[in-house]
């Protein structure tokens, strides 16, 4: 029995020794798969986006320019009125009487002048026929000129009385919304010939939007316009779009109508103003709004916004080199175009950008690319 075990061990021993000579071999896993795509090259409308404030084209305090009692108020607080609408009346009767007195005095002065003119002509004729004296002629001439001056004074008094009478009716100087009245019927206004504020009228259609553009943006915009052959300072052909805090997008359209002739030294910005129609008064002066000014279309490279990362060095994308090894590429990102983002600097059209599986793409490691094609989004 012992001999059989010894024989079996003698046979198995070489096999065990032979088995120990085989090394353990590590088979690495295949490279992780990531989706890659070339940047999409399309013409993109560039936008300048800023924050602005709406302002009234016209805003005027309505005041009492003559003393008197308020006899009537002809509007409802906050109502929209047309130009020329009667808003307040201030005791018109005394001023109408003064106007009529002035007109009567003017008629009397005109009659006196007519008599003085006739007397002067008679004295002139007598002097020419040498039957009148020079003294009588001079006296008639002086009287005629004095009565003429009196008529001119009477005419001025009539005009002044008419103006004061017109001041008894306070009318809307333009279409707009009138604020709540600050006086009541029966209240005495214009005491001591001091103007009394009655209300304020604000024009809301059209409406201005004011915003500031940085010096760098000003230079960029002027350079782009120069490339297109537009070197004029006329900005009225440049559109402007705005959206309120509750709007989706930029639904309100208008155009620029003013750009300051100089950059403010303290802020390094240029004051710019746009004008928009506002027939429904949806926009009110004082609103803070988002402003967008579209520029000329330019060929740009775009990648999905989700493919862009950021660290302390700035924004970057992951690209593959010729050996399918991941590299981190710093970029300068521009505006959003749907789910894509404009890349201003850092990419070339033939770069392969990792657009999916970013967690598996580690810089310095090899990956297996799965090519994809980006589609152009709709531009609003």
Image (spheres, rainbow, N blue to C red):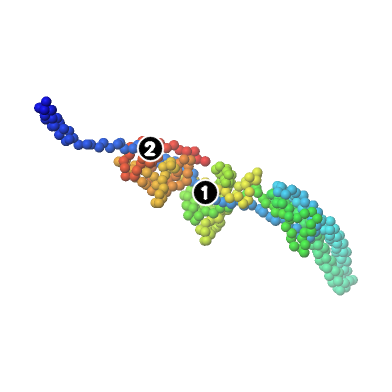
- Residue 332 - label: none
Q: Is residue 305 left or right of residue 238?
A: left
Task: Report the front residue among 290 and 15.
Answer: 15
Q: Secondary structure at mark 2?
A: strand
- Snapshot quadrant of residue 62: bottom right
Position above or below: 241 against 107: above
Q: Is residue 244 visible?
A: yes
Q: Looking at the picture, how far across and down is residue 228, in whole percent?
A: 48, 48
Q: Looking at the picture, how far across and down is residue 235, in whole percent?
A: 55, 51
- Snapshot quadrant of residue 163: bottom right
Mark earlier in primary sequence (2, 1) = 2
Q: Secondary structure at mark 1?
A: strand
Q: Quadrant of the N terminus?
A: top left
- Residue 35 - label: 2
Residue, disc 1? 49
Q: Is residue 173 left or right of residue 342?
A: right
Q: Residue at x 65, y 49 (%)?
A: 204
Q: Is residue 125 visible?
A: no
Task: Report the front residue among 20 and 184.
Answer: 20
Position above or below: 40 against 193: above
Position above or below: 114 against 171: below
Q: Looking at the picture, how far across and down is residue 188, in whole percent?
A: 79, 59
Task: State yes or no: discs 2 and 1 in contact (Cβ < 8 Å).
Answer: no
Mark 1, Cα crowd under 10 Å, few <14 / some 14-19 / many 20+, is some
Q: State the CA–CA distance, disc 2 to disc 1.
A: 33 Å
């Amino acid at each position: 029995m012992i001999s059989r075990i010894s024989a079996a061990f003698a046979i198995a021993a070489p096999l065990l020794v032979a088995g120990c000579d085989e090394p353990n071999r590590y088979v690495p896993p295949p490279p992780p798969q990531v989706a890659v795509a070339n940047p999409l090259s399309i013409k993109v409308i560039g936008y300048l986006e800023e924050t602005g404030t709406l302002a009234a084209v016209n805003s005027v305090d309505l005041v009492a320019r003559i003393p008197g009692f308020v006899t009537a108020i002809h509007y409802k607080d906050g109502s929209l009125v047309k130009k020329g609408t009667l808003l307040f009346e201030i005791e018109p009767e005394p001023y109408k009487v003064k106007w009529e007195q002035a007109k009567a005095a003017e008629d009397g002065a005109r009659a006196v002048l007519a008599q003085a003119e006739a007397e002067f002509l008679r004295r002139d004729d007598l002097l020419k026929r040498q039957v009148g004296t020079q003294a009588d002629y001079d006296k008639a001439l002086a009287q005629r000129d004095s009565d003429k001056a009196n008529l001119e004074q009477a005419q001025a008094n009539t005009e002044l009385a008419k103006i004061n009478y017109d001041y008894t009716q306070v009318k809307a100087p333009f279409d707009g919304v009138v604020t709540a009245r600050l006086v009541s019927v029966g209240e005495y206004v214009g005491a001591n010939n001091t103007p009394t504020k009655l209300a304020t009228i604000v024009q809301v259609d059209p409406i201005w939007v004011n915003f500031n553009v940085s010096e760098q943006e000003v230079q960029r915009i002027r350079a782009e316009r120069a490339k297109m052959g537009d070197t004029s300072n006329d900005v009225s052909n440049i559109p402007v779009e705005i959206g309120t805090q509750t709007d989706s997008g930029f639904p309100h359209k208008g155009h620029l109508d003013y750009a300051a002739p100089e950059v403010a030294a303290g802020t390094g910005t240029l004051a710019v103003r746009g004008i928009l129609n506002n027939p429904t008064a949806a926009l009110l002066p004082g609103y803070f709004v988002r402003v967008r000014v579209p520029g000329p279309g330019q060929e740009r490279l775009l990648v999905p916004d989700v493919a862009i990362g950021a660290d302390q060095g700035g924004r970057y994308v992951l690209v593959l080199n010729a050996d399918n090894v991941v590299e981190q590429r710093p970029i300068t990102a521009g505006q959003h175009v749907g789910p894509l983002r404009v890349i201003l600097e850092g990419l070339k059209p033939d770069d392969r950008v990792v657009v999916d599986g970013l967690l598996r793409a580690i810089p310095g490691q090899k990956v297996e690319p799965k090519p994809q094609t980006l589609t152009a989004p709709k531009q609003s």
